[in-house]
Image (spheres, rainbow, N blue to C red):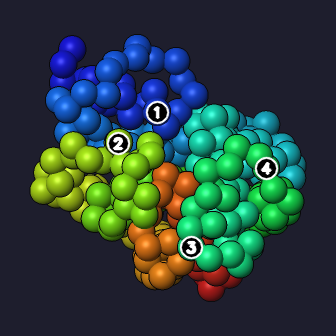
């Protein structure tokens, strides 16, 4: 059972799926971050299943997109969207760095977070609607693994802005060399899968992910002095949106 404990720690942290709970001890946390993309496998698998079912039932594009938007939120319990909203609130405040970090820790939901959550969901809905009409959604199911692998790489390699908090606790005992090797290998395999599924759609989705990663790294270091659990969620959500946008552009080119 011991070899599965890091996987179950990752699933219990980053999904709403009921799994056995284990202590966050040094042994379990060495490789827990390597299993973070497993949550993306669930999101991508369920989206693929819904895509196949929707095709059989001939559901409308709007209904398909509405359910597709909800799938990752229900699987994760909204943990990453929560980080996106907290970070959007902090960025929109135009306050000094320390105040921004305080805003992200505040449990109250600010007006900007609600506004930008609505913007995100509308864009997500629209992109999925268009991609479904093109028959390109299944090609992009691996992006849920990709966004989590890239988010984990950033969490392991970028400085922590607070030196405390959930992300710090999650990564402080990580075996970094092993984690980097596993996560980089996974990113390469996902990239290969996307290109093999569709060189144009998958390739432009990868370009979107690369742009999101570079932009996030620059923003996190410049604005916050590093990463936090909230900024990690912010990046993950934007990375998936950027992948969908890139895939849509690829669909228009075909």
- C-beta proximity under 8 Å, tags 1 and 3: no
| Badge number at residue 97 | 3
Q: Secondary structure at mark 3?
A: helix
- C-beta proximity under 8 Å, tags 4 and 1: no
- Please state if 88 lies on the left or on the right of 36 as rendered: right
- C-beta proximity under 8 Å, tags 1 and 2: yes
Q: Secondary structure at mark 1?
A: helix
Residue with the mark numbered 4: 109
Of mark 4 and mark 1, the one earlier in the sequence is 1
Of mark 1 and mark 2, the one earlier in the sequence is 1
Q: Secondary structure at mark 2?
A: helix
Of mark 2 and mark 3, the one earlier in the sequence is 3
Residue with the mark numbered 1: 13
Of mark 1 and mark 3, the one earlier in the sequence is 1
- Please state if 222 lies on the left or on the right of 191 as rendered: right
Cα separation between marks 4 and 3: 19 Å
Mark in the foreground, 4 or 3: 3
| Badge number at residue 170 | 2
Cα separation between marks 2 and 4: 25 Å
Of mark 4 and mark 3, the one earlier in the sequence is 3
State the residue at coordinates (86%, 59%). 111
Q: Please state, as top left, top right, bottom left or bottom right, where the C terminus lies in the image.
A: bottom right
């Amino acid at each position: 059972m011991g070899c599965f404990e890091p996987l179950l720690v990752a699933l219990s942290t980053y999904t709403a799926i009921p799994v056995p709970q284990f202590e966050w001890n040094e042994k379990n946390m060495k490789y827990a971050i390597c299993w973070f993309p497993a949550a993306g496998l669930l999101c991508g698998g369920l989206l693929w299943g819904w895509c196949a079912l929707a095709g059989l039932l001939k559901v409308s594009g709007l209904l398909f997109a509405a359910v597709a938007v909800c799938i990752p939120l229900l699987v994760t319990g909204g943990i990453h969207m929560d980080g996106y909203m907290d970070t959007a609130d902090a960025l929109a405040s135009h306050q000094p760095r320390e105040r921004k970090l305080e805003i992200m820790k505040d449990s109250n939901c600010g007006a900007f977070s609600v506004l930008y959550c609505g913007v995100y969901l509308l864009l997500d809905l629209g992109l999925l609607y268009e991609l479904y009409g093109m028959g390109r959604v299944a090609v992009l199911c691996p992006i849920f693994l990709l966004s989590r692998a890239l988010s984990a790489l950033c969490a392991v390699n970028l400085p922590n802005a607070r030196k405390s908090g959930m992300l710090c606790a999650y990564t402080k005992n990580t075996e970094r060399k092993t984690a980097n090797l596993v996560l980089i290998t996974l990113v390469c395999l996902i990239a290969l899968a996307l290109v093999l599924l569709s060189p144009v759609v998958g390739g432009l989705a990868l370009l979107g992910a690369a742009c999101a990663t570079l932009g996030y790294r620059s923003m996190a270091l410049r604005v916050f002095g590093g990463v936090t659990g909230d900024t990690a969620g912010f990046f993950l959500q934007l990375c998936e949106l950027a992948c969908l946008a890139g895939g849509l552009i690829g669909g228009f080119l075909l």
